[in-house]
Every structure is written in structure tokens, then in C-alpha cells.
Amino acid sequence: MPAPRTARSAPIRHPVQVSEPSLAVARALKEVMHSFRTIVEGEMRSRGESLSFAHAMLMISLAREPGLSGAQAARRAQVTAQTVNALLRNIESGGYVVRERNPENLRADRWFLTREGLRHLQQGWMVADEVARKMLVPLTAKEADRLCELLRRCAQALHTLQDAKSDAA
């Protein structure tokens, strides 16, 4: 038998206006990122490539910082070690990355992009660049530069919040 309903637990059966002025930016960012990612992945699939946006982000980290451990790659991508481990195993089986033992830490492998991985990453980068250019068509060059600057400043503010929270812990 279900628990009796109180006024607080009664269902609301009509639309409610929710004020969200500060969330409008977050919602817009999520929508842009979701659409961008979906279009890039769809274009890559149409070209016969099967790896996801998450795989590409991981490969970018390995291109920029060869020899990362799985844990380091997870921190860079802000995902769990288990998620990165699954992604790494997948791209390793495709020949896009190789792992080597870490002489400084025998419990952690080091991961490196292969030439095939770099080729694949560059193809994906061209697709992403093409989609980004189309996305920015409604903006002037000056507006696009300003948008990038504003988003960098927002990201820096969020990093500062994260750092302060980590320092307090």
C-alpha cells in the first residue's frame, strides 16, 4: 500500500514557470555542446570512423601529453578512471594508442598515441573545425573572438572555484 500523500508530495499536474536567469547560459552551453558533439560524431560515422567524441578528447590529451597514465588522463577529462580505462582499451584495440610500463610506477601504465591514432585524430579535427566554422557563421569574426574570450574567462572562474574547493578539502 502506498504511503499517504501530503500537500508536499502531491503531484503537480500543470506547467510551472521556473525562473532561471542564471541557468540560461548553462542551458545554452549544454545545447551547443550536445549539438556540436552529435553533428561531429555523425559526420565521422558517415566517413567510416566509429570512435566517439570522448575518444577524441582522450586522444587529444595523449597527443598533448604523451605518456599520461590512465588516472592522469581521467583527471584531464574530468571523468572516472573506469571510464578512461574503457576508452583506452577501445582505442588500443583499434591501434590508435599503445601502452608501456611506467618505470617510475609499476602499477600504472603510460599511454602514447600511435601514428594511426594521430592520423585519425587529425581527420576528426578537420571535421570538428568544419562544424565549428558553420556554427559560427551567424557571428562576425569579432563576435566569435569575443565569445571565445568570454568562455575562457568563465572556464577560468570555474577552475578557480574547483581549486578553492580542492584546497579546502
Image: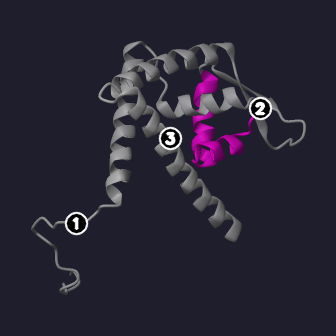
**Magenta region, main secondary structure:** helix
User: Looking at the figure, which quarter contains the N terminus?
Assistant: bottom left
> Which numbered disc flags the more N-terminal residue, 2 or 3?
2
Q: Position of residue 71 (x, y in %)?
A: 70, 45
Q: Is residue 51 left or right of residue 65?
A: left
Quarter of the image where one finds residue 41: top left
**From this viewpoint, is residue 80 visible?**
yes
Which residue is at a point 79% across and 41% down the rendered structure image?
108
Q: Nearer the viewer, residue 138 or 116?
A: 138
Residue lying farthest to the left in this orientation: 14
Which of label 3 and label 1 is nearer to you? 3
Q: Position of residue 165 (x, y in %)?
A: 63, 66
Q: What's the distance in space between the residues labelled 2 and 3, CA to CA?
A: 30 Å
Which of label 1 and label 2 is nearer to you? 1
Per the image, the residue denoted by label 1 is 18
Quarter of the image where one finds residue 85: top right
Magenta residues? 67-93
In the image, what residue type sits under mark 1?
A: Val
The answer to whether marks 1 and 2 mark residues whose Cβ atoms lie closer than 8 Å is no
Q: Position of residue 116 (x, y in %)?
A: 63, 13
Per the image, the residue denoted by label 2 is 67
- Give me the disc on residue 100: none
**From this viewpoint, is residue 169 visible?**
no
Which of label 2 and label 3 is nearer to you? 3
Per the image, the residue denoted by label 3 is 149
Answer few, some or many: residues within 10 Å of disc 2's Cα (few below 14, many 20 plus, some between 14 and 19): many
